[in-house]
Image (tube, helix red, strand yellow):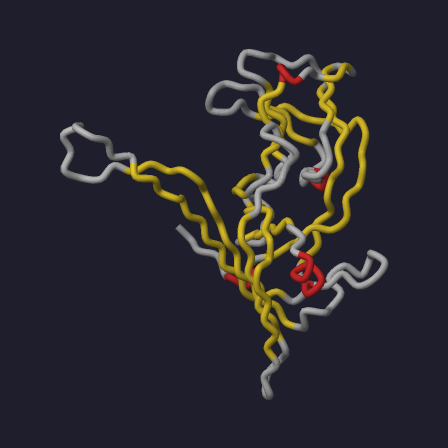
C-alpha cells in the first residue's frame, strides 16, 4: 500500500447558498438494506443547505414523505423507502452550497469518537462490562497562514473572516480531501470553538482553529452531521 504526501491534501469551507429547481439526479448503488438511492448529478451541487427543505420529484410529481427514507445533505444522496422503486426521472428542488478552499491552510487533524454506554445488565452471568455505541462525535483542528481577519470569500460583498464566524458561532461545513484527488472526502458541520493568532518574530503569521461537530438539518429526514463519502 502506498501512502500519500500530506501537502497534497486540501481543506474547504462552505460559501453562499444558491437555489436550484429541478436538479437532475442519477441512480447509484442501493444501500446495504436494498433501498434505492439517487445522487445529485452535478458534483458541484451536492453539498446541500441544511436550513432549506428539499423537494424530491418522481417523473415530475412531488414524492410523498412515505416514499423517502433519508436525504444526505453532505453528499446530495436521496435514499427512498425500503421496497419503493422510484419512477424516473428523479429530480429535486434544492439549495446547494459552494465550497471554498481555506486560504493557506497547512495542517489539519480530524478526530472521530463514539460515546460508549454501559449496557451491562443484572443476572446475565458476565464478569465483564458490556458496552454499546450511543452518540457519535467528531472534532477538527486546522492551521493556516495569515490572520483570523483575512477575507476567505472575496467573491462575497464584505469581509468573510474566520474571526467573524467564531464570534457568532455560525456552524460551518468543512471538507477535508486527504490525498487531494477529490476521490473520497470527509465532510461535516462544525461549530468553531477556539481560534488562536500566532505572530512569530522570524516566521509567517498563522492561526489555529478548532471545531466541534454540530449536526444540522430541519428534521430526522435530513442527514447533515459528518462522514466520509464520494464527492
**Which quadrant is the C terminus positioned in?**
top right
In depth, the one of 200 and 87 nearer the eye is: 200
152 relative position to 29: left or right? right
Residue, x 69% and y 50% (percent of image)?
A: 14
Seen in the picture, residue 99 relative to 106 is either above or below; the reply is above
In depth, the one of 97 and 167 nearer the eye is: 167
200 relative position to 58: left or right? left
Residue, x 74% and y 39% (percent of image)?
A: 96
In depth, the one of 136 and 76 nearer the eye is: 136
Residue 23 position within the rendered picture, expressed as x and y whole percent measured from the top left: 76, 29
Residue, x 20% and y 30% (percent of image)?
A: 122
Residue, x 57% and y 42% (percent of image)?
A: 215
Q: Residue furthest right?
A: 157
Q: Residue furthest front?
A: 122
Residue 79 position within the rendered picture, expressed as x and y whole percent measured from the top left: 59, 24
Q: How many marks?
A: 0
Seen in the picture, residue 90 relative to 188 is either above or below; the reply is above
Residue 53 position within the rendered picture, expressed as x and y whole percent measured from the top left: 72, 31
Seen in the picture, residue 39 relative to 15 is either above or below; the reply is above
The part of the image, by quadrant, that contains residue 128 is top left
Amino acid at each position: 500500500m502506498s501512502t500519500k504526501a500530506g501537502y497534497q491534501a486540501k481543506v474547504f469551507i462552505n460559501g453562499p447558498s444558491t437555489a436550484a429547481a429541478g436538479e437532475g439526479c442519477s441512480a447509484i448503488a442501493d444501500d446495504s438494506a436494498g433501498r434505492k438511492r439517487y445522487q445529485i448529478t452535478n458534483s458541484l451541487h451536492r453539498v446541500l443547505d441544511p436550513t432549506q427543505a428539499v423537494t424530491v420529484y418522481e417523473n415530475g410529481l412531488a414524492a410523498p414523505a412515505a416514499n423517502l427514507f433519508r436525504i444526505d445533505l453532505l453528499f446530495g444522496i436521496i435514499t427512498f423507502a425500503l421496497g419503493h422503486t422510484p419512477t424516473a426521472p428523479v429530480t429535486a428542488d434544492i439549495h446547494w452550497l459552494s465550497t471554498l478552499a481555506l486560504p493557506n491552510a497547512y495542517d489539519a487533524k480530524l478526530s472521530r469518537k463514539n460515546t460508549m454506554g454501559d449496557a451491562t445488565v443484572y443476572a446475565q452471568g458476565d464478569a465483564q462490562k458490556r458496552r454499546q455505541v450511543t452518540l457519535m462525535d467528531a472534532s477538527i483542528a486546522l492551521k493556516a497562514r495569515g490572520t483570523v481577519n483575512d477575507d476567505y470569500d472575496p467573491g462575497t460583498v464584505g469581509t468573510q473572516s474566520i474571526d467573524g464566524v467564531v464570534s457568532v458561532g455560525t456552524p460551518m461545513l468543512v471538507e477535508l480531501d486527504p490525498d487531494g484527488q477529490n476521490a473520497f472526502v470527509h465532510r461535516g458541520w462544525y461549530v468553531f470553538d477556539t481560534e488562536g493568532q500566532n505572530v512569530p518574530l522570524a516566521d509567517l503569521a498563522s492561526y489555529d482553529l478548532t471545531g466541534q461537530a454540530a449536526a444540522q438539518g430541519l428534521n430526522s429526514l435530513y442527514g447533515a452531521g459528518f462522514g466520509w463519502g464520494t464527492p
